[in-house]
Structures are given as structure tokens and as C-alpha cells.
Image: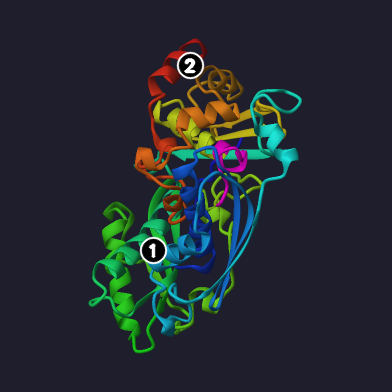
Amino acid sequence: MSKIHAEHVFTSESVSEGHPDKVCDQISDAILDACLEQDPMSRVACETLTTTDLIVISGEITTKAKVNWEQVARDAVAEIGYTSHDIGFCADDCKVMVCIHAQSPDISQGVTEGQGLHKEQGAGDQGMMFGFASNETEELMPAPITYAHKIVDELARLRKADPAKYYFLRPDAKSQVSIHYKNGKPMHVETVVVSHQHTADMKIEQLESLVKDVVKTVIPAKFLNDDIVYHINPTGKFVVGGPNGDTGLTGRKIIVDTYGGVGSHGGGAFSGKDCTKVDRSAAYMCRYVAKNIVAAGLAEKCEVQVAYAIGVAQPLSINADTYGTGKIKDDAMLEKIIREVFDLTPAGIIKTLDLRNPKKNGWSYKQTARYGHFGRNLFPWEKTDKVEQLKKSAEKFL
């Protein structure tokens, strides 16, 4: 059983939508969205690379959809804000290379109902996936990653909402938040780090003032005090950024995408993958399970792990860890409750969360690719609609 330290400081980071790796994630997920809009049964495993003046789109895509891959990529880059040549990366005329082929038939038969050894829809790959929830924030997320996301999200919102006022902000940015914990509870913010790409004529005082105002806006006052240490553009200059400053690649920000280093992480990234890939869909389901367990009051924090074999529908194992905060005396009992309440087969996950029809339900995969896949209520895996069923199922173990 995991221990809770009496006092410690924990740090998580986030990156903005203009970070080169996140540019790639958003392009890959924009392509997934475009395929699903026309063909919900599309099989997509899209990888994107960006560097100065270049986008490379590769991967395995099997779909009936007719998609202009190049235009989807350009539109995603333009939405982020890379629209002028002086930034070193421009959506209008950067080079786009497309290298896409169909999914392997060996993989396809394992995840297509009626094919393969087991005939039912199996997992798209082997591996283990994790989900986490904690009652330390309204979002039932760890506080450090929650507020690190909100800082860069708000800076991007201001940049786009009032480009004249915030002319000095460019798309690439990083944040980092360190929070002091006591007996497992967040007490106060100790340190905030923000590195933000900017125009050559920006004065550092402009960014310092803005960041401090944003921190006061997005982090609850109970976590703030006058002793917070700020490191804002600590190198002194961040003019060259985005894909012009650093090569980007899909799937390199997996800790930013999940829980900021709290808990565990499986072996796979999320963006560019359709819902038959359990790397993504089962991680979403594990978050759904863990969040409902915490929302039901069965634990103050909870981590859920599942494991799959390629082509096999039922998970090989389910493990729950409540870090000593569980209301049921033995966390092993949670496995029985989870199996009773949730369908963790790939087909069950897809149906429960309706992962083939994001646009119909008011969200997109591209939205998941910026500011974290967890903690925002627009996504179906953030619902807490299993609370009453969990409470009822747990009665016999309390």
C-alpha cells in the first residue's frame, strides 16, 4: 500500500498548444477527427513531425473518409497562431510531406469483431494503462498539473482574445507549478516557472506582470501567498521557439497529457490513435473509473490499472490503489466492484464513452491534445454518472 508523506513538495509541468510536440499532437488528432467525422469506423495511427518550415505526416490509416491531409494540418497550425514568417513557421506555406499507408491486416483482424482467434473485438495492442483521481481539486485532479495547465491555457486565451494588447506573446510556452503538501493535502504554491516565447521588443517586466496576474486568476486564493518564488523566462530571452526552435514529435508529452507525474503511466501515448487502441481508450476508461470511485466517496484518491493482450477482449488484470484513503478495508475488493459496474472490454469502453462520435457529442480529439486529456468536463470520461451504482455495489464490502 502506498504511503502518504507528512510534508513534501510536488512539481508538475505543462506546455502550451504552441509547443512543437503539442503542435504535432494537435495535427495528428485533427486528422483523426477528420476521418471520424466521415467514417466513425476509421482506423487511425497518425504520427506527425515538425521542424523549421516543415510538417511530416506519417502512419497507418484505413478509412472511407476523403481527407485533405495537408489542409487539415495547415488549419491546425493556423489555429494555434503560427501564421507569420517572422516566427519561423507559417501555416500558409510551410512544406507538408504526407507518408500514410493502411493498417496492417494482422492487427486489424485482432480488433475487428468476428475476425481473429477470439471472434469478439479485442484490444489493439498489449500493454498496461492507468487512471487517477484525487479530491484535492474540483476537477478531481492533482493540483500541480491542474494549475500548470491553467496558466498556459489562460495565457493562450489572452493572446488570441486581444492580440493588440498582448502583441508580445507568441505561441510556444511552458509552465511549472510546485505545491507544498501536508498529510497528503495541498497547502500552498511554492514556485511558479513560466517560459514564454515573445517578440524581440518585449520588456521582461511586461511578461512578469502578466504571469502574476494570471496566477491570481487561475489558482484559488487559498493556495497563494506573498512568498511564492517566480522564475519567468529565466534564461532572459525566448524569441526563437516553436518548430523553428525545436523539432516536435507526436506523443512526447505523455506526463503533461496525464497527471503530471502523480501516479503511474502506461507505455503508450494518446494522440493520433483511434479508440481501438487501448493505449488511449483504456486510459480514458481508467480515469472514468478512478474519478467515479473518488466522486462516490469510496476513496480520497485512487489509481486504477488495467492490462490487455492484443486481440483479447477482457482485461488480463485490474488493480486499484487508494493510497491508504479507501473506505473499503481492502483495495483488492475494488476489483470486484469495478468489474461489476464497468465494462472494460474494448467494445464496452467504446460504447460507454461513445468514442467514435466526438463531434456529435460536442468535443474533439484535437481538444484533448492541448492542456491535458483529463480534468475538463467536456470529455465523456470525466462524467461521474456511476456514483450511485458504485455506492450500491460497495455496500456489501463496507
The magenta segment? 272-282
Horizontal and vertical percent position of residue 125: 69, 39
Mark drawn on residue 394: 2
Label 2's element?
Answer: helix
In magenta stretch: residue 274: yes
Which residue is disc 1 drawn over? Answer: 152
Indicate the secondary structure of the residue bearing disc 1. helix
Name above or below for residue 199 compared with residue 100.
below
| Observer-nearest of 319 and 64 | 64
Identify the colour scheme used: rainbow
Place of residue 230 in the rendered image (x, y in percent of width and height, measured from the top left): 39, 71
* 171 relative to 255 in the view: left or right: left
**Quadrant assignment for the N terminus:** top right
Residue 358: name its quadrant: top left
Query: Residue at 47% across / 54% down in the picture?
Result: 30
Query: Going from the N terminus, do you reach mark 2 or mark 1 first?
Result: 1
Q: Position of residue 7 (x, y in %)?
A: 49, 50
Residue 378 position (above or below residue 57): above
